[in-house]
Image (spheres, helix red, strand yellow):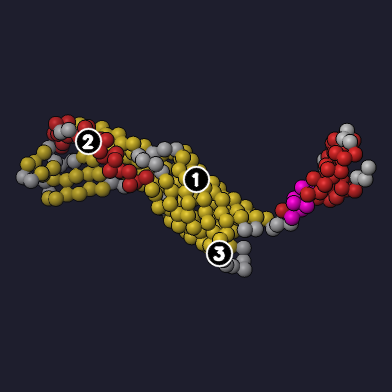
Amino acid sequence: MDFSILTYFFKIFKGKNKARVYRYLSEIVSGLSTSQRAKSIVLLCLVLLRFESFSQTQIQKYYGFGFGTTGVEVVGRINLGQVAAEASLSYIGWNQKIKRASDSTSDLVILPHINALMLNGSVLKKIYRQFSLKAGGGITLINQFKGEVYTTKGVNLDGVVISPEDFGYLRVRLHYPVLSPLLGIQWQSRSAIRRRWEIVAACSYRGRPRLDLEYEGFLETTNLSEQIPQLEKNLAGWSYYPVLSVRMLWEK
């Protein structure tokens, strides 16, 4: 049998395992009939030609960072011609107290607590010049969207003053699903140096949030607990989250 195809195979797959690959292929081919050998050689030729055209594609690796509506992020990407695979890790956090006072004797304190860490993966396909279609999804590793409302001086409601002890507190927490698909457009700058800017405009579907309420004080005298299903329905619009970010990447 002519093993020139195996020689061609070695030109593509160079490395320490050349002899092992040769031995395995020889054992496989030697156990076949003449017609089966011919079919196997043709099939192997097609596979190798396909692999060779793929191996000639210029592979580019990039890494960088960015910031946007998902917070700060670190990015890694592999470009294969018109297609690219990307992975990123994003984090956003906000815990700044908001205080509202109508006069010197009343105030309302809102304490948000946002802490979200996401691992994202996506595939990019160039569609027009510097624009690419971006599709993928994310896995939420840390998901904390909650807040607390209370007063330190009291609250004046249409002339009725409620003391801090009577007002109590209200704690709100939103629970989102772990997986969130994403679809959007990505633009990248043209540059002769190994550095480029990128802008991402996409939409992530987070799913309908589940609402948890914990309260104490005058809210216990209301029917707030019966309104939770309606509140969750009203929050359905929060299922779609805009993803806008600016990045800088370097070629490795």
User: For mark 1, what is the residue?
Assistant: 137
| Pick the front one: 79 or 196 | 79
| Vertical placement of residue 196 versus 115, above or below | below
Residue stretch in magenta: 47-53
**Residue 61: which numbered mark, if any?**
none
* Circle 2 crowding by C-alpha within 10 Å: few under 14, some 14–19, many from 20: few
| Residue 205 point in image, percent of width and height | 42, 46
User: For mark 2, what is the residue?
Assistant: 227
Instruction: Determine the secondary structure under disc 1.
Output: strand
Q: Which residue is pictured at 30% across the width and 34% down the height? A: 212
| Vertical placement of residue 135 versus 132, above or below | above
Q: Amino acid at mark 1?
A: Gly
Q: Earlier in the sequence, mark 3 or mark 2?
A: 3
Q: Which residue is pictured at 10% across the width and 44% down the height? A: 157
**Where, by quadrant of the figure, is residue 107 drawn?**
top left
Q: Earlier in the sequence, mark 2 or mark 1?
A: 1
- On the question of residue 63 being in view, the answer is no
| C-beta proximity under 8 Å, tags 3 and 2 | no
Majority secondary structure in the magenta region: helix
Q: Earlier in the sequence, mark 3 or mark 1?
A: 3
Q: Which residue is pictured at 62% across the width and 66% down the height? A: 193
* Circle 3 crowding by C-alpha within 10 Å: few under 14, some 14–19, many from 20: few
